[in-house]
Image (cartoon, rainbow, N blue to C red):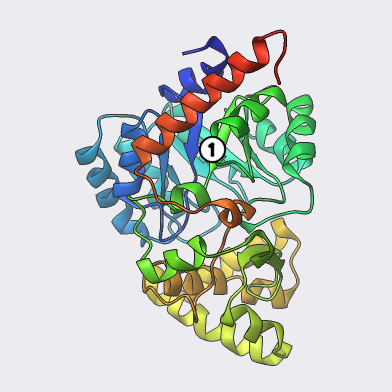
Amino acid sequence: MPPALRTKICDLLDIEYPIVQTGMGWVAKPELVAAVSNAGAIGFLAAATIAPEEVEGEIEKIKALTPRSFGVNFLMDAPGADVISDAIIRQGVKAAGYNRAPSAALIDKLKAAGVVCVPTCGAVKHAVKAEALGADIVVVQGGEGGGHTGPVPTSLLVPATVDAVSVPVLAAGGYFDGRGLVSALAYGAAGIAMGTRFLMTAESPVPDETQARYLGADVADVLVTSQVDGMPQRVITNELVARLEGSGILTRLLFALRNGLAYRSMTGASLTELLRSALSMQRNERLTRAQTLMAVNAPMLARTAMQDGDPVRGYLPSGTVAGVLGDRPPCAELIARMVEEAEATLERLSRADPA
């Protein structure tokens, strides 16, 4: 393998290739995580959509499927974050991923146990703060990425972040092949993180009815809306988005209240815990009260599409890359193909005439 593909994160995460599978709610389950790790990259379990007391059992499922490194992604401002952190430490998980409202106390606790801390950020200033709080690696997602996203393109955000922090940076948003991996390395990143590309693999648990929407999407079908939960999200447009776009604020708030009750049932959190989490998110994300209430929409509506197989009433978080993908390869085949293409790209660029 060319030395350029053996980056700092390979050593930090004990992996062969600088490729990370992101912690997508309802998608990044043990089978997908293990398949990615077995292929030489690293997968992250999505713990944000698992009841906290069940996370340790899911970690044990992954350990039964792979001897290789993997991570767990969770929300530090959500009820049960301490329970998940303890499970990560107890089970010797290699890495912890997190995003909004990072907890300095939890980060310190994870780092003291030797867990590699890998937050995801959408702005340079957030990456700088993440490093100050103890991040070992920072994932920065540009506007092409799926789910909650910002307005800055990956091609601008990644090099700016590389210049602003001293820890390794992983580029996310718009990556799906070996050429993209090489471009991220050229920006100064130490590798890439992919969500949508891994969502569209043979080991992905997403039902066929929902997968068909991803496979059939054009780039123009993948757009940003704020109507799902009050914050900008990149999604594949569908009937749900059209309905929410045409609804009044009262209808959307009542819709969110119903989903909030469902979220409480899923997590087992008390009203006090949910209120504390909401206030923390409101403070850290600078959300309005309406946005804070609507925030519970995303996980519950994603479950409808990603677990229940209903792409009409559920929402479809997606990176722009869904518009150019048309297959569902096994993870091992996908990663081998990406590495081969990256090697060929580096070889071509090294020749006198790269055309």
Q: Residue at x 34, y 58 (%)?
A: 205
Residue in front for this viewpoint, 215 or 203? 215
Quadrant for residue 240, please give it: bottom right
Q: Residue at x 64, y 51 (%)?
A: 145
Q: Is residue 122 left or right of residue 44?
A: right
Residue 134 in picture, x, y percent from top left: 61, 31
Residue 258 in picture, x, y percent from top left: 51, 86
Picture quarter with the C terminus = top right
**78 in relation to 275, above or below:** above
Q: Residue at x 48, y 69 (%)?
A: 302
**219 in relation to 10, above or below:** below
The residue singled out by tag 1 in the image is 107
**355 in relation to 87, above or below:** above
Residue 12 in picture, x, y percent from top left: 48, 21
Quadrant for residue 206, please give it: bottom left
Q: Residue 218: in sight, yes or no?
A: yes
Of the residues shown, which amino acid type is indicated by label 1? Answer: Ile
Q: Residue at x 63, y 78 (%)?
A: 241
**204 in relation to 44, above or below:** below
